[in-house]
Image: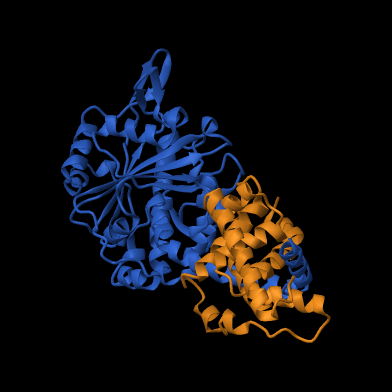
Chain colours: A blue, B orange
Amino acid sequence: MIEEELLRDAFARHEEQAPPLDPLRRAIDALATRRRRRRAATRTGAAAVAVALALAVPVQLWRGGAVADYVAAIGVESSVAAPSGPLNLLLLGLDRRGSMANSRADTIILVHLPADGGAAYLISIPRDTATEIPGVTGTFKINGSYTQGGAETVRQAVERLTGVRADAVAEVDFSALRSVTDALGGLPVCLPQRVTSQHTGDVFPAGCRDYAGAQVEDLVRQRRGMPHGGYDRDRLGQRVLLGLARKAGERSLLGDFGTVSRLARTPGLTVHTGDLSLLGLAMRLNRVDAGAVVGVSQPTFNKVTIGGESFEQFDPEVAPQLFAALRDDTMSGFVLLHPAWVLPQE
Amino acid sequence: MTYEEFVNSRLGALARYAVMLTGDQHTAQDLVQETMVRVQLNWRKVARADAPERYVKRMMINQYLDWRRGSWLRRVFLRPDADEAVAVPVDHAQRTADRDLIWSVLATLPRQQRAALVLRYYEDLPDGEIAEMLGCTVGTARGYISKALARLRESAERLSLGGVR
């Protein structure tokens, strides 16, 4: 048919009308950059909360009218309900070496937010705590339960141990902690005594100093060489989180979009929120007072040998009170009664 | 394949394809630009497609068909309506005039019909793939093509007083 021939001809002849490629390409890139920026801004809310959760730096980030302004700025529905009742967030500090099979949750902290707000409790679970894994024969160290089934398995192990079900779980690579620290321009960390790194030979003097990301990462890895091993390391982790809370407050992080969006892109942060909305969590975190972040950990070793292997277990007398306080939302009473379990603050 | 590699090798072809669909350079630029921004932002998904270029062309077709529903770029509709742009045959050699005439009449077709013609006579796709690109059945795709050809023939006859023959 002649129409078909004419059509092919007309198409071929109009190829020269194609828009010039260089300006086209520049226009595409410019537009994509703008949209990417906008997209980053809308994700910032969730990501900032992820960072806050993950690093247990609730606090001033969400204080005052900041959340409302923030919500308005990023154009998110503001009708999100903040969850009521106490909240429990599980923070896993991962020593990640390639795959999950090679990763261990070496720092396990249950972040407890009482229903009345105004405080946050960081409860460290010793990494060598003995635990069972349903369907798997034997006794495991709780840090190794991550290897068995990831974050959910650790959550379940913590639930069997404490009777507390974590509402959300955050996984943080130690390397992410380093990036976040640097993005914030360093963290103030207070040490009760001198720490000498077994990895780098660096010396961290007693007292409060500002540390860069690499130093903070080094610090939270210290176990061997510490007088009380993993126990001391858990408290170092809590001290770093306190520094993070302080820094986030000082920087009024919320107003600092540049930093927040850099934090938002930190690789190595994962948050599992289950049924909770991140924004709801954020509104909830808003109520936490910066000064009232309380580190809680077991002050003594309770070694137990199972099948020839050495494990840690919780103090059979005090720990049940701790777990009951978590479940009953009476932590303020527990820390009052058991000061030895509370991280001393300067 | 990276996004850069894809753009380096395929942007020219995509720009030409956009001209065939839209009929003019400026609208083609809008179409390519809008599509390629989404391609860039979602490159991992695009790259996972069996045939990324085909996938992108389908994105372009969808975008082009969406204009009809006014779902993006209102300014497209502020341009002179395609129907008004139908040119009076110009005083070139008869053969050239016929081609321009065809181009002008193409602008009067419903978008699906035009897209079907582009896929058949510019892209040289078989009916099955045309249907896939348009998201319709093979029968519907064939219907678009035959209706478009009939309308083309009829309009051309009317405008050129039987010159196309």
Identify which residue, A154 or A45, lies in the foreground: A45
B123 versus A105 height, above or below: below
- Left or right: residue B144 compared with residue B120: left
- Horizontal side of B133 relative to B95 (left or right) equals left
Q: How many marks?
A: 0
Most foreground residue, B24 or A178: B24
Would residue B39 be seen by someone viewing this image from the given angle? no
Quadrant containing the C terminus of chain A is: bottom left
**Is A10 on the left or on the right of A266, as rendered?**
right
Query: Which residue is nearer to you in this view: B23 or B86?
Result: B86
Q: Residue furthest right?
A: B93
Residue B33 is situated, as x and y percent measured from the top left of the image, at 62, 70
The location of residue B47, given as percent across then percent down, is 63, 50
Residue at the (36%, 42%) spot, across then down: A109
Q: Determine if residue A54 is in view.
A: yes
Q: Residue at x 76, y 63 (%)?
A: A5
Q: Is residue B131 above or below residue A231?
A: below
Q: Residue at x 75, y 72 (%)?
A: A14
Task: Specify the quadrant of the image occupied by residue A293.
Answer: bottom left
Residue beneath the point at 25% across and 61% down: A287
Q: Position of residue A107 (x, y in %)?
A: 43, 39
Q: Looking at the picture, how far across and down is residue A48, in whole percent?
A: 42, 60
Direction top: furthest residue: A307
Q: In the figure, residue A42 lies in which quadrant?
A: bottom left
Give the position of the N terminus of chain A as an image quadrant. bottom right
Decide which of B22, A328 is in the foreground and name it. Answer: B22
